[in-house]
Structure formats: structure tokens, C-alpha cells
Amino acid sequence: MKNKILFFVAFTICFLGCSTKEEHQKSEYLRWVGDSVFRSGIDSKTFSACHGDENIYQYFNLSEGPQYVNEKPALELRFKNTFKPVVGENQNGMIRIRFVVNCEGQAGRFRLLQSDFNYQEIIFDKAITSQLLKITKSIANWQIFYKNDTPIDYYQYLIFKIEDGQIIEILP
């Protein structure tokens, strides 16, 4: 009798633990950590990935640094000439701006991540983050990448090291 009860319990657990193909397709998880899906209210309705959200290459697939047409020195100069330092307490750490560059070299779906130098989440002064975001959004010269002669969509990011409200370095 105990064997029948154990078999019934084990069968019930296995049956209830199974999921259908449709349930897997409706997963709440994204393809990769950090994927950026369209969010109304913060994303431009005019920006879209050329080949759908499932076909956006991750930055680590490209083996390259920032893909700005005029190279990183021009990118750094742009921020140096435009960014106005914001002096304030605890304005030290890193701000990452991650975004999608579509097959036409246009950027969209900007996301911010802010941390101290120990990678603990902090919130920077809005005057700093809004400037960095505005400057990044104004860049129109992102490199177009090709795979098998077809332009692709890809994720790009910039990390700003901030000390005393000033940019000390831009990565990667």
C-alpha cells in the first residue's frame, strides 16, 4: 500500500511540474540578461530594431569597443566639450548607459545602471544622469555592422566613471 501511495505522490508531483510548450513560449524571462524590450513612456515610438527583438546581437558577440564612426577619441571629446560637472556629495561611481543600435546606425531603448565603485546601486544627481543620457541620445554616428552582407542590430553601452561629479573615464 505504501508503494502505491508513494507512486501516486511521485506521479502527481511530476505531472503538476510539467509545462506545455505554450507555457514556455510565454516566459516572463528575456532571451539574455539586459535585453531591452520597448517600454512606452520612456522609449521613442519611432525607433525599432530592423530584425526584431530576438535578433539583436549582444555587445560580446561583436568583440569590439564602442562603435562610433569617428572612433573613441571623438566620442570622448564630445562628452568633454558638452558635459558640465555637477559638484555634490556622493557623486562618485559608475553610470552605464546601454542601448540598441539598429541596422541603420540609429540608437534607441536607452537604459541606465548606476553604482558606486564597489558595484552597489546608488542614485546619482539627476543633473549628471540627464546630461549623460541627453549627450548619448544625440550621437547619430554609430557604426553599422554586417553579418553575411546584411546590416544587423546590436546592443552598445558606455560606462562613465564619475568622481566628484566629473567624468574621469569612459569605458569600454
Image (tube, helix red, strand yellow):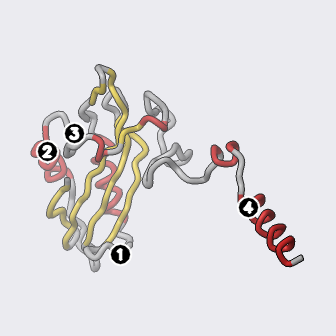
Image spot of residue 67 (x, y percent): 22, 39
Image spot of residue 108 (x, y percent): 40, 40
The residue at which mark 3 appears reads as: 67
Local crowd size for mark 2, using a 10 Å CA cut-off: few (<14), some (14–19), many (≥20): some
Image spot of residue 122 (x, y percent): 37, 73
Local crowd size for mark 1, using a 10 Å CA cut-off: few (<14), some (14–19), many (≥20): few
Helix, strand or loop at mark 1 = loop
Q: Amino acid at mark 2?
A: Lys
Mark 4 and mark 3: Cα distance apart in space? 49 Å
Q: Is residue 159 above or below residue 73?
A: below
2 vs 4, front mark: 4
1 vs 4, front mark: 4
* Foreground of the two, 90 or 25: 25
Mark 3 and mark 2: Cα distance apart in space? 8 Å
Side of 19 where 9 appears, left or right: right
Q: Amino acid at mark 4?
A: Cys
* Foreground of the two, 113 or 149: 149
Extreme residue toward the right, this view: 1
Sequence-first tag of 1 and 2: 2
Mark 1 and mark 3: Cα distance apart in space? 28 Å
The residue at which mark 2 appears reads as: 72
Helix, strand or loop at mark 4 = helix
Where residue 120 is drawn, which disc sits there? Answer: 1
The residue at which mark 4 appears reads as: 14
Helix, strand or loop at mark 2 = helix
Sequence-first tag of 2 and 4: 4
Sequence-first tag of 4 and 3: 4
